[in-house]
Image (spheres, coloured by chain):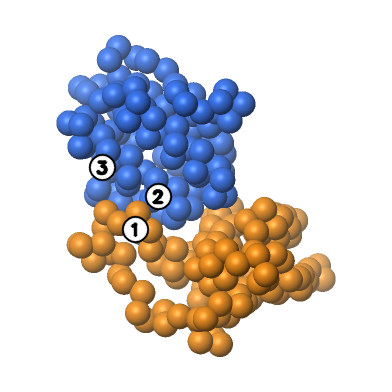
Chain colours: A blue, B orange
Amino acid sequence: MAAAAGQRRLDIEEVGDVTVARFVDKKILDENNIQMIGNQLFGLVDQDKRKKIVLDFANVEYLSSAALGKLITMNNKVKTIGGKLRLCSIRPDIYEVFAITKLNKLFDIKDDQATALAGF
Amino acid sequence: MSEPARLDVRIATDPAEAWLVQSQIVDWLKERQYPAPDQFGVRLSLEEGLMNAIKHGNRGDLSKSVRVFCEVSDVKTYIEIHDQGIGFDPAAVPDPLAEENLEKASGRGLLLMRQFMSLVEFRDNGRLLVLEKQRSTE
């Protein structure tokens, strides 16, 4: 990953051939933070060429529309290389943001990490 | 009933200053034990409104500022965010729920504010955003 360790905004774990990226932050709101998260997410595809990715939102309590933009770009990048992106462990407040914006239809969202990993 | 908390400040065109204002206001909601979904909606709407003022209103121009007025009482939260940009027509903002816009990376802030707040109004040719949240009954 290109980002310096001190700026790490995602915990990355390999489960079989699936990459699980867990957000470190509770609040994905401010622009600098979102920029860093975006860079690290895109690095998984652009540099590391990972094709099966689960984004785990268990820690996330807040998320803004700017963060949604990064997720959409990430989804498109993964699709472009023939991969799959799943989102999981989204708490109800945050899920409402996805539902309001109809992005719950665009993304493959699973209840928890085990379900997200199953049948990938 | 506690006294309303008030804030009337002019902040730089700087997300870091917006963050401080946002945190202060949300702290007041916490002190008054607003339900968690209210706190969530107000924080999100503040983030969207302040970033719109900084990025789209003032267009990042550091010579401009954003005035923020807020009053948090036990029953409602009232917020004004006033930028120094050229203004805009809220009616002309593309519908982010239209099929052709669903995968666009931006343009959802206004929709989210309208969903989470009790009132969203634009005045002064779009430069002044007024947000109001009535405290929910739990």
Q: Chain of mark 3?
A: A
In which quadrant of the rendered view does residue A71 lie? top left
Q: Is residue A62 above or below residue B51?
A: above
* Image disc number at residue A68: 2
Disc number lying in front (2 or 3): 3
**Marks 2 and 3 in Cβ contact (< 8 Å):** no
Q: Nearer the viewer, residue B9 or A32?
A: A32
Q: Residues within 10 Å of mark 1 (few under 14, many from 20)?
A: many
**Marks 2 and 1 in Cβ contact (< 8 Å):** yes
Tag 2 and tag 1 share a subunit: yes
Q: Disc 2 residue type?
A: Leu
Q: Earlier in the sequence, mark 1 or mark 3?
A: 3
Q: Position of residue A72 (x, y in %)?
A: 32, 46
Q: Secondary structure at mark 3?
A: helix
* Distance from Cα at disc 1 to Cα at disc 3: 17 Å
Q: Disc 1 residue type?
A: Thr
Disc number lying in front (2 or 1): 2
Q: Chain of mark 1?
A: A
Q: Earlier in the sequence, mark 2 or mark 3?
A: 2
Q: Position of residue A3 (x, y in %)?
A: 51, 28
* Image disc number at residue A101: 1
Instruction: Please report the residue visible at 38 percent of the width from the left and 63 percent of the height from the top.
Output: B107
